Every structure is written in C-alpha cells, then in structure tokens.
Image (cartoon, rainbow, N blue to C red):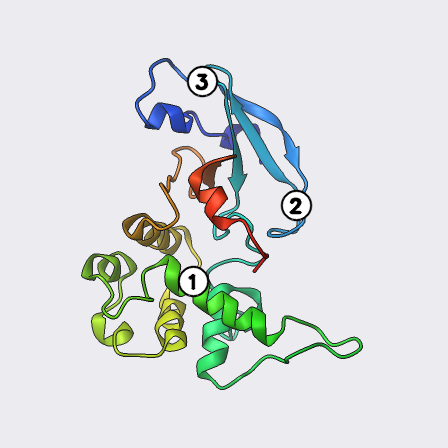
C-alpha cells in the first residue's frame, strides 16, 4: 500500500485518546490464509499500538473475499467468496465431499462453513433479522426472513463489490456487534484497520474458512 494511503489516525485516537497520531509503516506480514499476498502493518508512534491493513472486501483469517465478484457476462465465481458458497447451495451445486487426485477445491464442508459464518456475522441466524441490519444492507424482510440459511445468505449476492456495498456490509457487521468494534479509517478508502490483538482478531481465530 502506498504511503499516501496510510490512515492519519489510530484506533486509540478514535476511542478518545489524546495526542495527535503519528502513523507510519512498520513492515509487511506474510499470510498463510486470506489475501494471497503480504499485508501492510502500521504503527502509531504516539499511542504505541500496531494495526494490520486488510484489503477491501476481506476480513481477518478469511481465505476469500466476502462479496462475489462478477465476470464480464455477469456470472458469479461461486467458489471465490463467502456469498458465492450460499449462491451455489441454493442452485443445488454441492461441492465435493473430498478431492480426488488433481481436482480443484474447495469441498462441501467449506461450503457449509462459509454459509454458517457469514449468516452469523450479519445476524441472519436469528428467527427474524433486525430491521436496522436489513436497512443497512438495502434488503427487505421478504428477501431474508422465513428462508433457509443458504437462501438468506445468498440475498447478499445483490450487493456489488464496490466501496459503497462494502460500507453497507461493514455497517451491518457493526450493528450486529458479534465481531467487536468495526472501523473504516479515513484516508484509506474502505481498507479495514483491525487491532493486532483486538477482540475481532480473537473471535476470528480458528480453522481457516
């Protein structure tokens, strides 16, 4: 990430800590999961805390993006996103139980895990989804309530993959609150800035999705 895209404040400042932030690059962190490239780590010299910058559309410890990218013909690569797993499920496309020889993954348990995680993250695992969450996502109760988990999550496929749609999704995460505080930092578009040892990161630890 270019130096000009670094945030001008840290999370301590957003939480009310005094003193002007001095945020600079602290290096790069290799990734075993998630975006297939190193992630930028930044540090605030005033408040002595460090953060990781995640690309728009990704959450910590996730192997793939949340929302589905569409090809030139409008088709969705269902295996490249969390939403795509739900879209495949309602189409009746069950991923293989296990891979044989040189078959390409992911497998069925990954499909189920992606649908379950995403549904819980935005509150779709409740009998009735909160109207505030639906409003943030631009969805209606008819599109989400009284449906199977996969059908509910697949409704998120209506969201595009631009910055506005990502802000909607982040807003829904924040309303549900199951992942801890969510921030979108000014000066870096919609890049996610997450505490290196914050509640969000602790919550997300476990088997990679």
User: Dividing the image into 4 quarters, which one contains the N terminus?
Assistant: top right
Q: Position of residue 75 (x, y in %)?
A: 51, 75
Separation (CA) of disc 3 from disc 1: 33 Å
Query: Would you say 148 lies left or right of 88 here?
Result: left
> Of marks 2 and 1, which one's residue comes earlier in the chain?
2
Who is closer to the viewer here, 53 or 145? 145
Tell me the number on the disc at residue 47: 3
- Answer above or below: position of 71 versus 32: below
Tell me the number on the disc at residue 197: none
Separation (CA) of disc 2 from disc 1: 21 Å
Label 1 sits on residue: 118
User: Dividing the image into 4 quarters, which one contains the C terminus?
Assistant: bottom right
- Residue at point 51% right, 67% down? 113
The answer to which quarter of the image holds residue 154 is bottom left
Who is closer to the viewer here, 80 or 178? 178
What kind of element bears circle 1? helix
- Answer above or below: position of 191 versus 148: above
Who is closer to the viewer here, 164 or 83? 83
Tell me the number on the disc at residue 31: 2
């Amino acid at each position: 990430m270019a130096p000009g895209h670094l945030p001008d404040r840290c999370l301590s400042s957003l939480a009310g800590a005094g003193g002007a932030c001095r945020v600079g690059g602290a290096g790069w962190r290799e990734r075993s999961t998630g975006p297939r490239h190193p992630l930028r780590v930044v540090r605030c010299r005033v408040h002595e805390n460090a953060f990781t910058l995640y690309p728009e559309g990704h959450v910590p410890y996730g192997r793939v993006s949340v929302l589905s990218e569409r090809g030139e013909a409008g088709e969705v690569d269902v295996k490249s996103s969390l939403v795509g797993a739900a879209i495949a499920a309602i189409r009746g496309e069950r991923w293989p139980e296990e891979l044989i020889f040189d078959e390409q993954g992911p497998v069925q348990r990954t499909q189920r895990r992606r649908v379950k995680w995403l549904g819980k993250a935005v509150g779709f695992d409740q009998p009735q989804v909160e109207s505030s969450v639906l409003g943030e996502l631009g969805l209606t109760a008819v599109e989400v309530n009284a449906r199977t988990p996969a059908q509910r999550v697949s409704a998120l496929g209506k969201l595009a993959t631009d910055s506005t749609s990502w802000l909607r999704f982040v807003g829904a995460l924040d309303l549900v609150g199951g992942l801890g505080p969510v921030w979108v930092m000014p000066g870096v578009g919609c890049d996610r800035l997450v505490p290196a040892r914050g509640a969000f990161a602790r919550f997300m630890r476990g088997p990679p999705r």
